């Protein structure tokens, strides 16, 4: 039977003429289906037919596992997680178990063979070898795949080493066969996706993953790919991994490594996709310090994994947002408290006075602005262009008086607009300004109605009698600033 794909619109071995009515109908059908117009390059006179195989001819096989329920052989597995959760250390622990034939972390029997490790994030000398030694690996069976080399026509490899990517499935297959590897670790996926491949476009990612999956099936090895999480949150755990959703779709198993945000010392490996088996229990682990020796006199500090058994940690718990510290313990919370105390008891102050005193108390102006907005402080204009800030009354809605940072940072485009903006507030503010600058009063009398500096009492605005305890700013008079 003829081999090949039937993407050119052939049916039953007959060719659809590329320019005939049938071809035009086919193009319109594709566009209506959302696939867009398709241009097919086909040699003239060549026809194609389907390749069929009855499912009855397929012999059933049991799934073979590297780690039962979690890491299948002949397929792709992703290990996702935030940085600093020990993904690489976990992968090296599994590789070490393969090289010695040790049991898997949950006690199930393991396989004995070699392991291939591809890493561009961790240094082999300072990180990978010390961790592998701490995990008890047989280092002679743990191989680093550093790149690829061109093979000359005479069969000899070139001296130059080129970078390798996941698209080099044939090179990976050769490496697996040469070493007898049953596990290939790619750490991390973004370092090996390949030049020019957009990780967020399914049509670019899928061919790379399909080729890698075919390599795994043909060689029978397990491929474990480490992946970071996206910064943005998503509804489903399987969608939290970096890049296109096709990463998770191509994998037969997706595992999540992480800690409980409420109790960071509790870590676990949780299955978020398990296409080939029932969902396994979460298994806990811890990262513990370890020491290996480059020579008898040179200790090297490293880390290894200890497994703590089945646990009840879930993917939702691991992916939950980290708890926000109490506002009182943050710079914003401390600025809130300071501003509330500075304006307590009905006191009013200019912004210059507040920022000066806040800096002396160790608060930044930007933090003070945020505290002002959070508390809903109100701004009242007094005199010509001068304003004071105060806390909102308990029974007032602070929203109309709350001025955000953008509003205060924008200046009107002209002096006329500035004056209009200063005085186009409420009738209450206009009456207050009028009351605080009574016609015919001398500057000191006007000042008695006037503006408080840092700790002026409420009577400074409501009474015509000067408050002897109040510290106040100079007040504007027609002939200039009038000092106190």
Image (tube, rainbow, N blue to C red):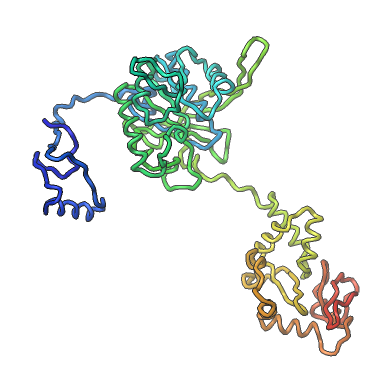
In the rendered image, which quarter contains the C terminus? bottom right
Numbered circles on residues, count: 0
* Residue closest to the far front: 153
Q: Residue furthest bottom?
A: 440
Q: Inspect this view and state whether residue 425 appears.
A: no
Residue 174 appears left or right of 414: left
Q: Residue 270 location, x and y as percent?
A: 44, 34
Relative horizontal placement of residue 244, taking residue 365 as reference (left or right): left
**Residue 312 vs residue 278, the one in the foreground:** 278
Depth check: give the residue in front, 107 or 173.
173
Q: Is residue 469 above or below residue 21?
A: below
Residue sitting farthest toward the top: 296
Residue 25 in the image: above or below residue 138: below
> Residue at left 18%, top 40%?
42
Residue 336 horizontal/vertical position (percent): 71, 58
Q: Position of residue 408 (x, y in %)?
A: 67, 67
Above or below for 231 versus 90: below
Viewer-proximal residue, 354 or 51? 51
Quadrant position of residue 299: top right
231 is higher (above) or lower (below) than 300: below
Tell me the residue at 35%/15% (across/down): 155
Q: Position of residue 446 (x, y in %)?
A: 85, 82
Q: Is residue 468 visible?
A: yes
Query: Where on the picture, by quarter, is residue 441?
Result: bottom right
- Point out the image quarter for the N terminus: top left
Which residue shows up at 49% across the image and 22% down it? 93
């Amino acid at each position: 039977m003829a081999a090949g794909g039937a993407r050119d619109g052939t049916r039953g071995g007959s060719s659809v003429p590329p320019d005939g009515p049938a071809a035009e109908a086919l193009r319109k059908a594709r566009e209506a289906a959302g696939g867009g117009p398709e241009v097919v390059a086909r040699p003239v006179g060549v026809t194609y037919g389907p390749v069929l195989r009855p499912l009855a001819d397929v012999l059933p096989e049991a799934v073979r596992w590297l780690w039962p329920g979690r890491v299948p052989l002949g397929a792709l597995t992703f290990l996702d997680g935030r940085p600093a959760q020990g993904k690489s250390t976990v992968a090296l622990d599994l590789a070490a178990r393969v090289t010695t034939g040790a049991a898997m972390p949950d006690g199930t029997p393991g396989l004995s063979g070699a392991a291939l490790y591809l890493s561009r994030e961790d240094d082999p000398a300072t990180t990978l070898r010390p961790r592998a030694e701490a995990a008890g690996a047989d280092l002679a069976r743990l191989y680093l795949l550093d790149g690829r080399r061109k093979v000359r026509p005479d069969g000899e490899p070139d001296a130059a080493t080129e970078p390798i990517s996941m698209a080099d499935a044939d090179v990976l297959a050769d490496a697996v066969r040469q070493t007898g590897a049953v596990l290939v670790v790619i750490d991390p996926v973004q370092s090996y996706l390949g030049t020019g491949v957009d990780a967020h476009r399914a049509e670019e990612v899928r061919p790379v993953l399909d080729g890698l999956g075919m390599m795994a099936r043909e060689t029978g090895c397990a491929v474990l790919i480490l992946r970071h999480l996206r910064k943005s949150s998503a509804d489903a755990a399987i969608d939290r991994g970096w890049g296109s959703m096709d990463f998770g779709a191509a994998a037969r198993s997706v595992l999540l490594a992480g800690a409980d945000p409420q109790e960071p010392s509790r870590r676990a490996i949780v299955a978020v996709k398990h296409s080939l088996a029932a969902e396994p229990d979460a298994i806990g682990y811890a990262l513990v310090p370890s020491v290996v020796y480059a020579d008898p006199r040179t200790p090297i500090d490293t880390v290894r994994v200890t497994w703590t058994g089945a646990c009840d940690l879930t993917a939702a718990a691991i992916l939950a947002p980290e708890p926000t510290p109490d506002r009182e313990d943050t710079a914003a919370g401390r600025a809130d408290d300071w501003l509330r105390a500075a304006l307590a008891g009905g006191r009013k102050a200019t912004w210059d006075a507040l920022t000066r005193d806040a800096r002396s108390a160790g608060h930044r102006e930007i933090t003070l602005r945020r505290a002002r907005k959070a508390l809903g402080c109100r701004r009242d204009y007094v005199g010509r262009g001068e304003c004071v800030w105060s806390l909102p009354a308990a029974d007032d809605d602070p929203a109309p008086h709350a001025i955000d940072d953008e509003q205060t940072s924008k200046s009107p485009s002209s002096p006329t607009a500035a004056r209009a903006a200063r005085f186009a507030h409420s009738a209450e503010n206009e009456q207050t300004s009028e009351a605080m600058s009574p016609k015919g009063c001398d500057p000191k009398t006007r000042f008695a109605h006037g503006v408080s500096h840092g700790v002026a009492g409420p009577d400074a605005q409501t009474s015509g009698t000067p408050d002897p305890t109040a510290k106040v700013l100079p007040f504007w008079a027609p002939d200039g600033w009038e000092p106190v």
